[in-house]
Image: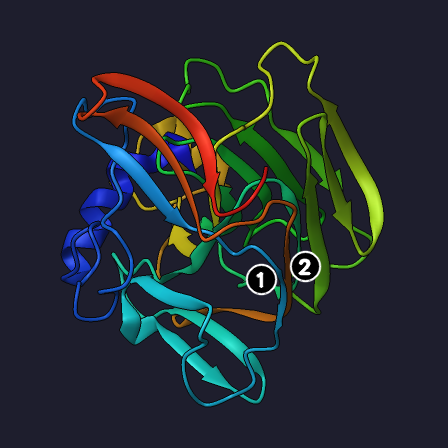
Amino acid sequence: MLGTIFFFYFIILTCGFEYRYEISDLDEIPIPCNPRVDGQCFTRNMALSQQIEEEFKLNEPSPYFHYNTCPEGIEYGQLGLQLKINKRYDNPSLMSKYYLLYGKVEADIMAAPGQGIILSIYLQSDDLDEIDIVEIFGGNPYSVQSNFFIKGNITTYDRGEYHLVNESPMGQFHRYGIEWTPNKMTWTLDNQVIRVVPKENPYGIPDSPMALKFSLWAGGDESNEPGTIEWAGGVSTYNDVPYIMRVKNVYMNDYSTGTEYCYGNSLKLNQWLDTTARNGVI
């Protein structure tokens, strides 16, 4: 996801919503900022501090998630959550209202078929730590990708791995998961371990609080860089819209506790403060 951050900004503007969320919907949530690049930013993330399960089967928004972009492409119902691309430049995305700091996440996902159409499920922090739980390519019924990034570092793209699937990720639900601890990251597919990355790897492990995000986007849009289009599996034509992904049975377990996770640049103390859990422990 990090490799397409400028494309996402353009997409978000075409949908009519800026990256910083509508306060009327999120007035209890502090506006996010990146303390690594903003010297006046002190990050406060609402802590999940528990385990939750969300089926997305009510005909109304979840209390644990809110839309990030393109609300017209997000639907709730008896089939679960649907993210839908109806036209070019649509990028429906949803994110959790709460952050976890180490923990476990699982979800049942059915991807959207379509050349260049990408389904992304990932954890991301305000300072751009990221774990891609899975990225699914709408034109590839044979494999999916896992990946991770540390503090927005995209100087190399050698952290991703591809994983074979026994049945097409577009034809039925598969369960994708990640367990993230200070010592390692463990990816699962249909409850089977498919990848383990220890903290001793050359890049380290994300250590900032992260929110869970779901996104459906056209990596193959012809406005993207050639490398992105090739990675996505080819040019997206939009001949078969709508492209629809489905999500149900989301499980989140925060291994830390507290009301907020805080870190960044303290103007009062004039120094950087490492992550702490207010009223809790990490």
Q: Is residue 55 left or right of residue 7?
A: right
Residue 1 lies, with reference to residue 85, above or below; the image says: above
Q: Nearer the viewer, residue 155 or 186?
A: 186
Residue 175 visible in the picture: yes
Residue 234 lies, with reference to residue 161, above or below; the image says: below
Q: Are marks 2 and 1 in contact (CB under 8 Å)?
A: yes
Q: Quadrant of residue 1?
A: top left
Give, as a three-letter code, the residue at label 2.
Answer: Pro
Residue 23 percent coordinates (x, y): 17, 63
Colour pattern of the rendering: rainbow
Give, as a three-letter code, the residue at label 1.
Answer: Ala
Residue 240 visible in the picture: no
Q: Quadrant of residue 51?
A: bottom right
The residue furthest top is 202
The tag on residue 111 is: 1
Q: Earlier in the sequence, mark 2 or mark 1?
A: 1
Badge 1 marks a residue whose secondary structure is loop
Residue 35 percent coordinates (x, y): 28, 27
Q: Is residue 4 left or right of residue 10?
A: right
Q: Quadrant of the C terminus?
A: top right
Residue 56 percent coordinates (x, y): 54, 78
Residue at (18% x, 22% y) in the render: 39
Residue 247 lies, with reference to residue 228, above or below; the image says: below
The tag on residue 11 is: none
Q: CA distance from mark 2 to mark 1?
A: 6 Å
Q: Nearer the viewer, residue 238 or 63?
A: 63
Residue at (34% x, 72% y) in the render: 73
Q: Is residue 63 left or right of residue 184?
A: left
State the residue position of label 2.
Answer: 169
